[in-house]
Image (cartoon, rainbow, N blue to C red):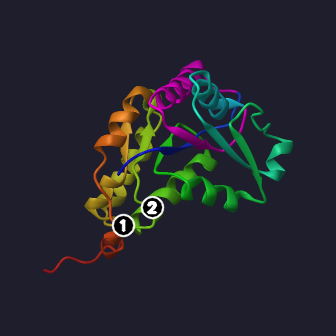
Amino acid sequence: MSIQRVTVYAASSQALCADYINAASRLGRSLGNAGLTIIYGGGGHGLMGAMAEGALSVGAEVHGIIPEFLTRVEAGHQALTSLEIVDDMRTRKARMLERSDAVVALPGGCGTFEELFEAMTLKRLGQFLGPIVLVNTGGYYDRLLAFLQQSVDERFMNQAHLQMWQSVEEPEQVLDALGEAPAWSTNAISGAAVVRSAS
């Protein structure tokens, strides 16, 4: 699969430690230097803003998508290649994913989790086929990854579903992870259900 457009999920919090901000900026620069087009939530603050600034600083195309109601509390970045204002969160999420060849998740809160899990669910059902990469800055996603492993161990998901995502420690490792991600097929839906093994 040729990766040209990458959706990045990220936090908008303005109260984060510098390590997270730095990693987000580095991710933007790394993706931009690779010539990739970036799609994200359009915010100008937090990890969203830092990632976008990093990408723009190296001349990348960065497209933001933000719901109209959020423009009152989460300033849309005004220097993007484009900033699309949509009606609601559902439309934003659908647009971000339908235009993308891959997903990268920086650390975030419940909004980032929701976006990430929707991408994972669609991939499990063969509706999204691209790589999903978590940037595990400072071990932020360690407990989530352990929980996902538990869901496999307890048969809520199949072992094969652990191939749906990759995790990297440093943002510069994302490009390799995108290139090395296992191929995924629309036939994934045939293995989406967990069935009882024959005894």
Q: Secondary structure at mark 2?
A: loop
Amino acid on which disc 1 is placed: Phe
How many marks overall?
2
The magenta stretch is 15-44
Residue where numbered disc 1 is placed: 156
**Residue 7, percent across and down?**
54, 46
Question: Closer to the camera, 135 or 34?
Answer: 34
What residue sits 19% from the left and 76% below the top?
197
* Image quadrant where residue 143 sits: top left
Question: Closer to the camera, 115 or 67?
Answer: 67
Q: Quadrant of the C terminus?
A: bottom left
What residue sits 47% from the left and 64% below the top?
122
Give the mark nearer the N terminus: 1 vs 2. Answer: 2
**Residue 142, percent across and down?**
41, 38
**Residue 174, percent across and down?**
40, 34
Amino acid on which disc 2 is placed: Phe
Real-space Cα distance between discs 1 and 2?
Answer: 20 Å
Query: In the image, which disc is placed on residue 128?
Result: 2
